[in-house]
Amino acid sequence: MEKIRTLVVDDEPLALEMVADYVNQTPFLSLVSSCANAKDAFDEISKGDIQLVFCDIQMPGVSGLTLTKMLSALEKRPHVIFTTAYPQYALDGFKLDVIDYLLKPFDMDEFLKAATKAKRMLELEEQASVSLSGSTSAQQPTEPVEGQDFFFVKSEYKLVRINKSEVIYIEGLKDYIKIHLDQAPKPILTLMSLKDMMQKLNGSPFVRVHRSFIVNTSFIRGVERGQIAMSQGSCVPIGDQYKQQFNEVISGKIF
């Protein structure tokens, strides 16, 4: 892939110069601009040419956290790596789906590790885009693909491929979901709604059975007293408003 078009944001001149210098030393990064405040950064990012932002959090006026939230409204949202002197912002970074955070003061090695995460993420997104482009029209690139047997989610600052046939059930947890996979040691946690996940799954054999659960009917062992027994030992409740839909799906599988 081409060099990653990068922006640096920091209100401290020395920190701004240091990070910009790190960008210039990194072979796969290209420094587009450096900004001393969030307003100038947002104006630059709005042009749609930036792929990666190294962003300070504590800035006068609009903070790096607020700037990152503002980026979600853009059609072409860049990835963000926070640079901060405050480790408690790590959780905020996860909620905002940033790639990584660098704790000040950091050196070139730490910077390079974070930048490499961004490079891997962008490469995976590029591969996913190429994979999907053969099955979707140019006019509707974001629509679910009939027959597509996998999808990608962001988890722990990376892009993870999920094979639909391995999904046992999906559990909703406020703004997050847990994807429970067959033969996996732990579920995949990602920032997404169950509604959006249903669109990715694109129907059969998946059915929503509760406001907090989607199940793969291929892994159902049995149903008793409003509970679905899944093949790996878990039990999933059936919500009242989903009973009729679930019964209709199951009735078509009873012989």
Image (cartoon, helix red, strand yellow):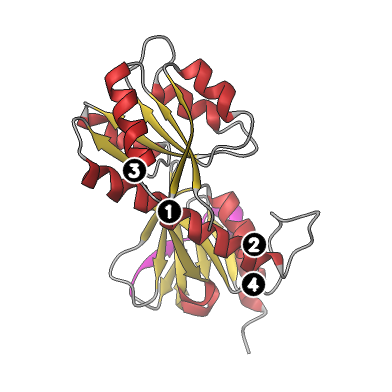
Q: CA distance from mark 2 to mark 4?
A: 27 Å
Query: In this figure, which residue is indicated by the disc labeled 2?
Result: 244
Q: Which numbered disc, 3 or 4, marks the residue that appears first in the sequence?
A: 3
Q: Position of residue 223 (x, y in %)?
A: 47, 73
Quadrant in the rendering for residue 229: bottom left
Whether tag 1 and tag 4 are in contact, CB under 8 A, the answer is no
Tell me the mark number nearer the camera, choosing from 3 and 4: 3
Magenta span has 44? no
Quadrant in the rendering for residue 236: bottom left
Instruction: Between residue 134 and residue 114, name the one nearer to us.
Output: 114
Name the image quarter holding the C terminus: bottom right
Query: In this figure, which residue is indicated by the disc labeled 3?
Result: 25
Q: CA distance from mark 3 to mark 1?
A: 15 Å
Q: Which residues are magenta?
A: 233-242
Tell me if residue 157 can be seen: no
Q: Residues within 10 Å of mark 3 (few under 14, many from 20)?
A: some
Q: CA distance from mark 2 to mark 3?
A: 61 Å
Looking at the picture, which amino acid does disc 3 mark? Answer: Gln
Tell me the mark number nearer the camera, choosing from 1 and 4: 1
Could you tell me which secondary element the residue under label 4 belongs to? loop
Instruction: Between residue 236 and residue 137, name the one nearer to us.
Output: 137
Residue plotted at (44% across, 14% down): 62
Query: In this figure, which residue is indicated by the disc labeled 1?
Result: 119
Looking at the picture, which amino acid does disc 2 mark? Answer: Gln
Residue plotted at (47% across, 24% down): 67
